[in-house]
Amino acid sequence: MDYKDRESVKQFLEENDIKDVVELDVLFRQITGVLLEEMLEAERDDHLGYFRSDSRSKQRDNSRNGYSKKTVRSNHGELEVRIPRDRKGEFEPQAVKKHQRDVSEISEKIISMYAKGMTVRDIQSHLEDIYKASISAQTISNITDRILPQVEEWRNRQLAEVYAIVYIDGHKYRVRREGRVQDMTVYGGLGIDLNGKKDLLGL
């Protein structure tokens, strides 16, 4: 998706059934969280020197040790990220550093990695920019291999055939209350459930 191209943005919103800014922020926050965690997992794999499924893992002198939770700020609101740990306490994550509480700088790059049309090289270029040479080219390649299935799964996910929709509108009136003239809005709406049944809403 080209963020500067109006038609590209419009297509993205339609494909993801985005109706307002709130829904868009929720979607982007979820995407950022998922991809950040995958990047951190790949970093830990690189630090330990083996993948989770590696049969040689029992021969290593260090191993995985669960996760700690951390709340960080992004361009789309706060999100909770699981930070991988190792038993020796030597793993120092780079995507979200130990005392880092703001990931706004990288959140837009993460979102763009989910956009259609990006090649493996494009994604690697984004990762190199995020990490700013703090990790090796091989680690970048490993991270790319790990996040590509996530990206492809999201791009090719099956959308629901029917969505619940609520239309809300209101009319503003000037009313006198306690000796003062005030603006008041009367709201009403029309809801459509998953079976297509309509129902007037009094709000």
Image (tube, rainbow, N blue to C red):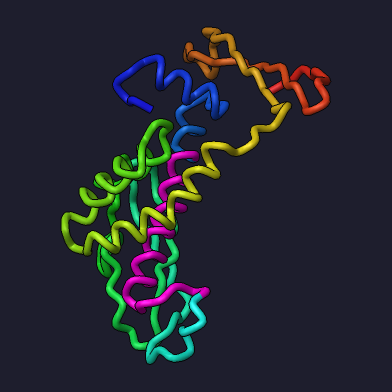
Q: Is residue 123 above or below residue 139?
A: above
Q: Residue at x 32, y 75 (%)?
A: 47
Magenta part of the chain: 27-53
Q: Residue at x 31, y 77 (%)?
A: 91
Location of residue 13 in the rendering, given as x and y in whole percent from the top left corner: 49, 24
Q: Residue at x 72, y 27 (%)?
A: 161
Question: The C terminus lies in which quarter of the figure?
Answer: top right
Q: Is residue 137 above or below residue 6?
A: below
Which residue is the extreme one toward the left? Answer: 133
Frontmost residue, 142 versus 16: 142
Location of residue 112 in the rendering, given as x and y in whole percent from the top left corner: 35, 37
Question: The N terminus lies in which quarter of the figure?
Answer: top left
Prevailing secondary structure of the magenta residues: helix
Numbered circles on residues, count: 0
Q: Quadrant of residue 118?
A: top left
Location of residue 162 in the rendering, given as x and y in whole percent from the top left corner: 73, 26
